[in-house]
Amino acid sequence: MKTLYITDLDGTLLNDEGRVSTRSAELISGLSHRGVAISVATARTPATVEPLLADTYTTADLVVMTGATLWSRVHHCFEDMHLLPEADVRLMLRVFAETGLAPFCYVQRDGSHLDVYHEGADLTAAERKFVDERAHLRLKTFHLREACPVDACGRVVLFFGMGSKEKIVDAAERLRSESDCYISYYKDTYTPDLWLLEIFAPGVSKAAGIERLLRKIHADRLVAFGDNLNDIPMLRMADVAVAVGNALPEVKAIADIVIGSNNEDAVARAICDFESSQNA
């Protein structure tokens, strides 16, 4: 029986400093060198995931951008990317203009690079922090005060917005009434009173991305780790659903096991324990 261990990043594998601890990196790398299949499922893009995992050796594809695409760490490229329908992109651009929301628009440039457009006249403090933390990354390029080019509307993979709960919910609910695309909004893990909006192609989810990865590596058992509401679908599909100690109550309620917090190397230690018991 082949097991895939898959973990959320923020609030789960990453500690409160937003990093993979040295000990977690050592444990996961050691298991991966022994052939254990370990991956992450995250809303992040490869541009931010790769630096976070720079000291963590894994071989399985990563489920990134909420499952809109897999990312091959071996070949350093996107695998099976799902793009937003062009008609929906045009609808969304209209709704954003009407609601005063200016989300970041992620466009596939090639097999490994994303162009990110933001047409707002000025960035909010949260948006500026978001850009400043990512502007130096190799795998994405920001184009500020630029609308998504007309000829790129067929290559949009993600709209990512941030703002007040009122503005985010307004835009999201209007779009849900007119589009079958994946539309999710939730409170930010790190910043009080900041809400986030993600929009992907229909059928996109962490769970769907994980299913593709399971088939690709021929795994027949899934152990999943999470902390937030958007992790619930992948936890429900897992053979063993694991919540970290700092997870939301709703996540703990549906988990089979609750382990230590994200500051205690709990995910890496739990994988070690699972492997030890499986091989005993």
Image: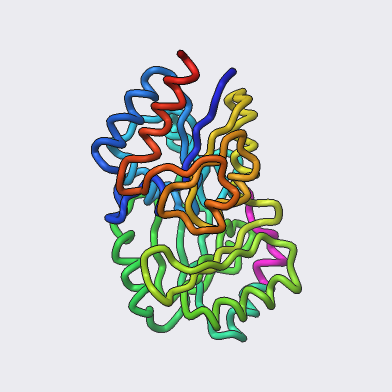
Residue closer to the observer: 269 or 220: 269
Q: In the depicted view, which residue is nearer to us: 123 or 234?
A: 234
Q: Is residue 215 left or right of residue 78?
A: right
Q: Quadrant of residue 211?
A: top right
Above or below, comparing residue 185 to residue 17 in the picture: below
Left or right: residue 206 compared with residue 39 = right
The color scheme shown is rainbow
Asked if residue 173 lies in the magenta stretch, the reply is: no
Q: Is residue 128 visible?
A: yes
Residue drawn at (51%, 66%) of the image? 160
Which residue is painted at 39% across and 74% down in the image?
Answer: 192
Relative side of 1 to 277, left or right: right
The residue positioned farthest toward the top in the image shown: 280
Judge from the rendering whether residue 118 lies leftward or rightward of residue 56; answer left or right: right
* Image position, residue 216 (x, y; %): 61, 28
- The residue located at (60%, 49%) in the rendering is 254
Find out whether residue 83 is within the magenta segment.
yes
Q: Which residues are magenta?
A: 82-90
